[in-house]
Image: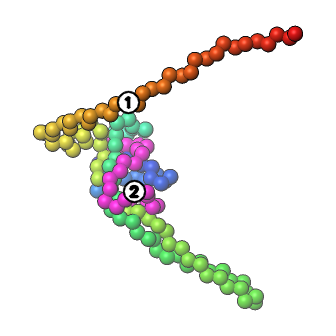
Amino acid sequence: MTYAIVKLGGKQYRVQEGEKLLVDRLAVDENKAFNPEVLFVGGDGQAELAPKGVEVTAKVVGHVLGDKIRIGKYRKRTGYKRHNGFRAKLSQVQIESIGTKATRAAVAQPAAAKPKPAAAAKPAAAARKPAAKKPATTKKAE
């Protein structure tokens, strides 16, 4: 079973394909895929630290709120009572695939994919030449 250690929101998670995680809120819209930074890939008797060309694809399933945490402060015989609450903002992430970029690109593209026509290049604005430099003059004491 192949697994990877990825970095999400400043924390590291051990993930496998098809796994769902609750992580701190990410700046990615719901139902959008993204590629987190891969720190380690292992499994099947092989391990690679800081792999080149290995990509993990993850999808944000939704943004949710964590459980409410109630905070209470109390000091005896003074009438001091304070209550506060907190709910963490979380993102639910599903790991779609773990693999190299080359194998994933071959699977993602259909066999008869047509190349897109090149967009017409806009003429570049006339480049300005830098002003000619004046020779330095030295002042002679009179």
Q: Which residues are magenta?
A: 21-45
Which badge, 2 or 1, comes first in the chain's sequence? 2
Give residue 77's position: percent from left, percent from top.
75, 89
Q: What kind of residue is marked 2?
A: Val
Give me the C-alpha separation between circle 2 and circle 1: 35 Å
**Residue drawn at x 61%, y 17% as measured from the top left:** 133
Figure check: 124 above or below 81:
above
Q: Of tags 2 and 1, which is closer to the observer?
A: 1
**Residue drawn at x 29%, y 56% as measured from the top left:** 18
- Residue 54 sits in quarter: top left
- Residue 82 sits in quarter: bottom right
**Residue drawn at x 40%, y 52% as measured from the top left:** 14
Using the image, tell me which numbered label, if any, was put on residue 28. 2
Give residue 85's position: percent from left, percent from top.
56, 77
- Residue 100 sits in quarter: top left
Answer left or right for 5 relative to 138: left
- Residue identified by numbered label 1: 124
Colour style of the rendered protein structure: rainbow
Helix, strand or loop at label 2? It is: loop
